[in-house]
Amino acid sequence: MAKNDTQAATSQIAALAAGTIGISGKPKTPLPMPALGSTCGVMVAEGQVLVNNETGARFEEGKETPQTVTVTTLRRLEDGCLVRVS
């Protein structure tokens, strides 16, 4: 695989993980910010290491985690440290 092909594939995998594109490769509409106190599914952004304040454990990269929305959750979503997936 050529270097450009590898970079393109890596970029597409990152976009899939971030939820910005679907399996078809077409862009997805970003989910709106959740309301405080609601529950949503989040994933840690690639390259981030974050502690889940609900469990005290790290978020697992590439795994959706249910999260009760707090001010910290909203800040992490806004900063791009967490990505809302459901």
Image (cartoon, rainbow, N blue to C red):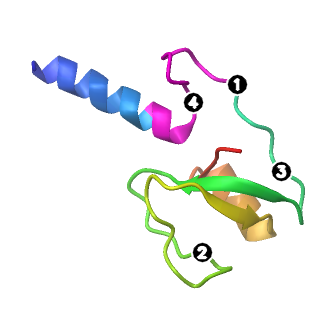
The secondary structure type at the circle numbered 2 is: loop
Q: Position of residue 10 (x, y in %)?
A: 30, 32
| 26 with respect to 29 (left or right) | left
Boundaries of the magenta span: 15-28
Q: Position of residue 22 (x, y in %)?
A: 55, 24
Query: Which quadrant is the C terminus positioned in?
Result: top right
The residue located at (69%, 62%) in the rendering is 66
**Cβ atoms under marks 2 and 4 closer than 8 Å:** no
Q: Is residue 19 above or below residue 49?
A: above
Q: Which residue in the protein does label 1 denote?
A: 29
User: What is the C-alpha distance between the residues marked 4 and 1?
Assistant: 7 Å
User: What is the C-alpha distance between the residues marked 4 and 3?
Assistant: 17 Å
Residue 10 located within the stretch drawn in magenta: no
The secondary structure type at the circle numbered 3 is: loop
Q: Which residue in the protein does label 4 denote?
A: 20
Q: Which residue in the protein does label 3 denote?
A: 34
